[in-house]
Image (spheres, rainbow, N blue to C red):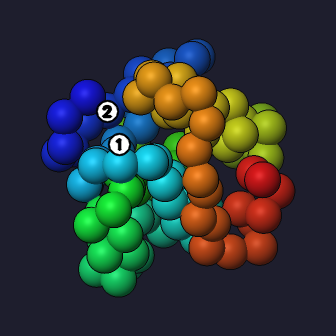
Amino acid sequence: MVAGSHFVELAGGGRMFYTKKGSGPPIIVAHGGPGLDHTYLAAELSAFAENHTVIFYDQRGSGRSHNAKKDKEHITIETFVDDLEELRRCLGYEKSELISMNQFNRSLV
């Protein structure tokens, strides 16, 4: 997958937005939230793209990710983990590093 902005189709419907920069071992960046988007992290963390492939994504119900179910049944730790795994698989990574920016995302690890 080339650098730039893309979408991943989510299981159960919806699309998850992500942007990819650089090349090298992958780092996936999970923004704070739910409700925020990746843009507040991009300026500082894009520096990692000098030596890594950095993937910023907008979590389900946030930013440019859309059409995913956003009710309390679908906005769960389990759903967010599934979405993150779907992104990783779609990008073809067996494993990646994860930068997580808040307490909620610690559960993704």
The numbered dot on residue 7 is 2
Residue placed at 61% from the left, 73% from the top? 101
Query: Is residue 10 at all visible to an observer of this figure?
Result: yes
- Give coordinates of residue 106: x percent, y percent: 78, 64
The numbered dot on residue 61 is none
Q: Amino acid at mark 2?
A: Phe
- Marks 2 and 1 in Cβ contact (< 8 Å): yes
**SS category of the residue bearing label 2:** strand
Q: Is residue 102 above or below residue 25?
A: below
Residue placed at 31% from the left, 75% from the top? 47
Q: Residues within 10 Å of mark 1 (few under 14, many from 20)?
A: many
**SS category of the residue bearing label 1:** strand
Q: Quadrant of the N terminus?
A: top left
The numbered dot on residue 17 is 1
Instruction: Using the rendered view, name the quadrant where residue 6 is placed.
Output: top left
Is 17 on the left or on the right of 68, as rendered? left
Q: Residues within 10 Å of mark 2 (few under 14, many from 20)?
A: some
- Total number of numbered discs in the rendering: 2
Q: Amino acid at mark 1?
A: Phe
Q: Is residue 108 above or below residue 100?
A: above
